[in-house]
Amino acid sequence: MARLITGITELVTNEAEVDGTPLGVLPDAALVVEDGSVAWIGDAKQAPACDERLELGQRTVLPGFVDSHTHLVFAGDRSAEFAARMAGATYDGGGIAATVAATRAASDDELRDLLRLREAELRAQGTTTVEIKSGYGLDAEHESRLLRLAREITEETTYLGAHVVPSGIDRSAYVRTVTGDMLDACAPYARWIDVFCEPASPHAFDGDEAREVLTAGQARGLGLRVHGNQLAHGPGVQLAVELGAASVDHCTYLSEEDVAALAGGDTVATLLPGVEFSTRSPYPDARRLIDAGVTVALATDCNPGTSYTSSMPFVIALAVREMGMTPDEAIWAATAGGAQALRRGDVGRLAVGARADLTVLAAPSRLHLAYRPGVPIACALDFTAEVNG
């Protein structure tokens, strides 16, 4: 069945050939959706006849947001930790242990219900593609359980057994577990492997440990992702580029060599401004990265400790206000940039053959995403869900 979507004041395609800009914006546009994919895009006056018509009433349409970094499967609450940070406490990763304990204690059904609620939050704010990490199990049984549950809602699942070293466990022994029995249990449910490479934290992993984790996952056919350079200068970015990781995330503390490495490779720098908002930390310098030619993505890092937001519009507003990005750059990073961070060509753009994942704004222009922060103007319209039942 072909469905015509019309009443679009502004259609963002992320196809540069449309208007010569990265966003490829079409005014007064329409598109046709068939079998979950885009079948036609163009001027509304030239739209073909279709089986059904959906009139949006003069709204803006973008590709669905691609949230390429989240930790959605967890139980428990860390609001007191947030309050302490607002009063001056610093973040070093130690609070993750509290979430691990709560998550291990929760049943599959309890975690599934929490996950579905968070997925609904994402969609209500325009996200149509989401990556989900494990990392709150920290043993083979619980890490594989989290990935199995995540797989119920997304194919973009990431094994993060190397989130932190659990208290009371020898570091070398834990790395052997992460690259051995735990990897064996988790690999069937994961597309990616990740590591928190942060020598500045006593709970995270240094460069040698991170290399061991990543190369073990790569040998099992998993793609690479890295948490890097969040708390201080370190080896995470250089290691990610060297090993061909799809993305290195945080990128707050970067040397000139780090920026040059990112500009010369195909590893995406994924920035997570919700973290800096929630930890009172310095924001990454997106302007420096973009001006150097680095591909930048934006994501929520939705997690209970350092960025408990599921809102990509909020992240876009922060990126514009705090990180030197223009509204158009931030929108591209939240859509096409996220797709590149997941090495996906079927999402983050609207073109014939792409998935019909749409973000609809109750606004006449895309600029309202940053112009009206905190206002619920975005929602997801995902026609692939109809096809997939």
Image: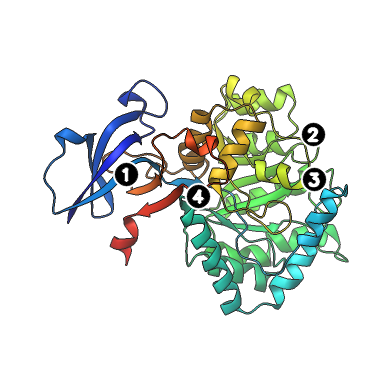
Label 1 secondary element? loop
Find disc 3 in the rendering and name its residue: 206
Find disc 1 in the rendering and name its residue: 354
Instruction: Identify the amino acid type marked 3.
Output: Asp
Q: Is residue 282 left or right of residue 362?
A: right
Task: Locate the N terminus by quadrant.
Answer: bottom left
Residue at the image point whose x is 27% and y is 41% from the top: 7
Label 4 secondary element? loop
Location of residue 213 in the rendering, given as x and y in whole percent from the top left corner: 69, 52
Dot 4 and dot 1 residues touching (CB under 8 Å): no
Q: CA distance from mark 3 to mark 4?
A: 41 Å
Find disc 2 in the rendering and name its residue: 233
Q: CA distance from mark 4 to mark 1?
A: 26 Å
Closer-to-camera residue (23/144): 23
Find disc 4 in the rendering and name its residue: 376
Location of residue 191 in the rendering, given as x and y in whole percent from the top left corner: 52, 55
Q: Residues within 10 Å of mark 3 (few under 14, many from 20)?
A: some
Q: CA distance from mark 2 to mark 4?
A: 37 Å
Instruction: Identify the amino acid type marked 1.
Output: Ala
Residue at the image point whose x is 77% and y is 57% from the top: 164
Q: CA distance from mark 3 to mark 1?
A: 40 Å
- Please name which of the two marks, 1 or 2, marks the residue nearer to the observer: 1
Q: Earlier in the sequence, mark 2 or mark 4?
A: 2
Q: Residues within 10 Å of mark 4 (few under 14, many from 20)?
A: some
Quadrant hosting residue 19:
top left
Dot 1 and dot 2 residues touching (CB under 8 Å): no
Quadrant hosting residue 373:
top right
Closer-to-camera residue (181/169): 169
